[in-house]
Image (cartoon, rainbow, N blue to C red):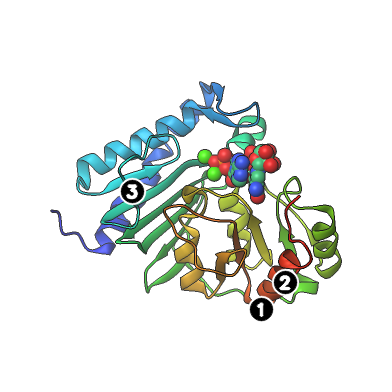
Amino acid sequence: MTNYQLNDIDQMVTEWLENIDNIIPKLIFDMHTETKLNRFDLVTNVDQQIQNEFQQFLSKHLPDHQLFAEEKSNEGIDPRQGHVWIMDPIDGTANLVKQQEDYCIILGYFVDGEPKLSYIYDYPHGHLYKAIENKGAYDNNQILLAPPIIDIKDAILSFNTQVLNDETMHELYEASFGHRIIGSCGLDSLRVIKGQFGAHINTNPKPWDIAAQFLFAKELGLKMSSLDGKQIDLSTAAPFIISNEGCYKEVLEILNSGSGYGK
Ligand code: NAP
Ligand code: CA
Ligand code: CA
């Protein structure tokens, strides 16, 4: 087994992400889109090729690391065991297809279920966000500070308006400063990480939607949990919130009041 230090692996993956800049423009130029479960569930050659490139990178440089990713079968891989990378090759595919903006690559590296390295690559805006276990979080190598406390009345909250019931949304609007949604779980979460949003909620994420957020939350003192306040199992994911500490409790109280947040 290759016995790399975390720093070495970070350098290799950062270089891989920098090199991907050379292939993305051509992939987008040649973009073709397919639907998966329904007409809103999209995948493109960009998603598939980026994931293939990363799989090849792992096979070549880190052959004992496994890939658990959206556009492949993950049968037989337990992300809680051994060296596992969880990847969403394009998070915000609908934005890529419709706007060519507001999408990102999400990567999380776990050793026996513990998050070690995390990346959210905002390619259209040229920002690579990373978190390194016990070394903090960075935006293009500039250290990110823990965001200031945001009270719920000052907080922008981010959630998909198709999935919460009207009463819950009304209560969230009333209690907060307002609502915004970018349409990429990774980039909406980043707004919380950077202190721009108070919280982001996704009631149905898959492991790759939230793989990077575990370590950013840990390094920057943010709250990340299921919507009943429990720890999230990274192999299954669960209804999820990433939140500033200043509004986390209140948002969860609203979501769980009455008959809950579901339609
Ligand atoms: P979208 O623009 O397609 O996606 C917005 C974000 O949610 C992206 O990060 C996307 O990841 C992720 N996502 C895509 N499908 C999802 C799903 N079924 N459940 C949870 N997250 C999902 O979102 P949209 O156009 O507003 O909605 C498309 C469909 O996804 C709708 O049926 C919507 O209800 C559902 N959705 C549900 C939630 C939720 O909180 N339950 C959140 C977003 C969307 P990729 O780009 O990698 O697919
Ligand atoms: Ca996603
Ligand atoms: Ca995706």
Q: Name the amino acid, label 3.
A: Glu
Which residue appears at 76% of the width and 68% of the height? Answer: 257
User: Depth-wise, is mark 2 or mark 3 nearer the camera?
Assistant: 2
Q: Name the amino acid, label 2.
A: Glu
78 sits to left or right of 118? left
At label 3, counting other C-alpha atoms closer than 10 Å, the crowd grade (few under 14, some 14-19, many 20 or more) is few
Element class at badge 2: helix
**Looking at the picture, does residue 216 appear above or below residue 88?**
below
Q: Name the amino acid, label 1.
A: Ile
Which residue appears at 22% of the width and 48% of the height? Answer: 62
Element class at badge 1: loop
The tag earlier along the polypeptide, 1 or 2, is 1
Q: From the image, tell me which residue sits under label 2.
A: 253
Which residue appears at 28% of the width and 46% of the height? Answer: 66
Q: From the image, tell me which residue sits under label 3.
A: 15
**Cβ at disc 1 under 8 Å from ligand 1:** no
Q: Foreground: 51 or 256?
A: 256
Q: Name the quadrant containing residue 82.
A: bottom left
Gap in Å between the C-alphas at discs 1 and 3?
34 Å
Q: Give percent across and percent down for residue 252.
A: 68, 69
Q: From the image, tell me which residue sits under label 1.
A: 149
The tag earlier along the polypeptide, 2 or 3, is 3
Which residue appears at 31% of the width and 52% of the height? Answer: 84
Q: Foreground: 166 or 151?
A: 166
Classify the position of ligand 1 by quadrant: top left, top right, bottom left or bottom right.
top right
Disc 2 vs disc 3: Cβ atoms closer than 8 Å? no
